[in-house]
Image: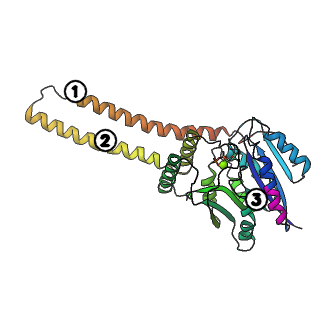
Amino acid sequence: MKKLISVIVPCYNEQEVLHMFYDEISRVAGEMSAYDFEFIFVNDGSRDNTLKICKELAEKDERVKYISFSRNFGKEAGIYAGFEKSKGDLVCMMDADLQDPPALLPEMVKAIEEEGYDSVATRRVTRKGEPPIRSFFARMFYKLMNKISKTEIVDGARDYRLMTRQFVNSLLDMGEYNRFSKGLFGWVGYNTKWLEYENVERAAGETKWSFWKLLLYSIEGIMAFSTVPLAISAVMGILFCIIAFAMILFIIGKTIMFGDPVAGWPSTACIILFVGGVQLFCVGILGQYLAKTYLEVKGRPIYICKETNIEE
Ligand code: UDP
Ligand code: MG
């Protein structure tokens, strides 16, 4: 029996690249004749012909499977759905836009099969072709994240990975709603080998991540893997109490010695505004965690599958 490799591809409006991607992955699969393959395309509520192309491919090639969502649930949900439906002994996830070169696959498989790793991850060492401001914020995010979270998150890590079935099952055991894969991968542990490569630009189509979407995603990451913001707000509270106490002592002393001519209301107003702002900020942090807890507690499904050609 040959071993089966599942390749999971989240697709959101990828009609321009899907054929190119399929050709490339089939070529690579053709070179790895020691393995069977299944390609799982997860159509994440695309508004273009992505689903149609998936179906056409599935008709031509029985290795092609598709899962189509009822709406756009996000890439994380797509990956989760792929993991759930995959049957492979080895499971690989990669983007549809050929930014994750399928040609690395043989090397990745070798690392697991021969070198005994549980997963092989990739990171790009350059951010060529990316707007500089985006690179700057991305770097800041990784720095901050690794300071305040115990889970290691590697700078430049891509969501291009090959994993053993055991690794995938561990990921599936984490059924949380707010999924931040880059953190989950670190959290489950195991031995991971890192391959490095130069950044490749998108083959066609355009990126689905606006700056704003990335910012929200990074906040999600911080909150999913760190409670340090909560501690910061607590520490800030204590700090301001101490300052206030010192000021009270100072004012009492001053009044006893020099009397109390009415003055200083502008500074009082400033202090009130400042402290009020800090309080709102801290309540806001609290609210964010509460909101996440609320979503988690509702226990909604991570995705809704509208149609698929995968039999249970
Ligand atoms: N993607 C998805 N759902 C989304 C956004 C993106 O499934 O809501 C997929 C997309 O089709 C692609 C991968 O996630 O295969 C990475 O997206 P993209 O290339 O736009 O991101 P970038 O490489 O620019 O970070
Ligand atoms: Mg991309």
Res. 253 image quadrant: top left
C-alpha span from label 2 to label 1? 20 Å
**Image depth: mark 2 or mark 1 in front:** 1
| Amino acid type of the residue that numbered disc 3 sits on in the rendered structure | Val
Residue 265: numbered disc: 1
Relative image position of residue 148 (x, y in whole percent) = 48, 54
* 99 horizontally vs 255: left or right: right
Residue under label 3, please give it.
91
Using a 10 Å C-alpha cutoff, classify the residue at mark 1 as few (fewer than 14 neighbours), some (14 to 19) or many (20 or more). few
| Amino acid type of the residue that numbered disc 2 sits on in the rendered structure | Cys
Q: Which colour scheme is used?
A: rainbow
Q: What is the secondary structure assignment of the residue under circle 3? A: strand
Task: Report the front residue among 281 and 309.
Answer: 309
The residue under the point 62% across, 38% down is: 295
Q: Residue furthest top?
A: 262
Range shown magenta:
24-33
Magenta segment, prevailing SS (helix, strand or loop): helix
Residue under label 2, please give it.
241
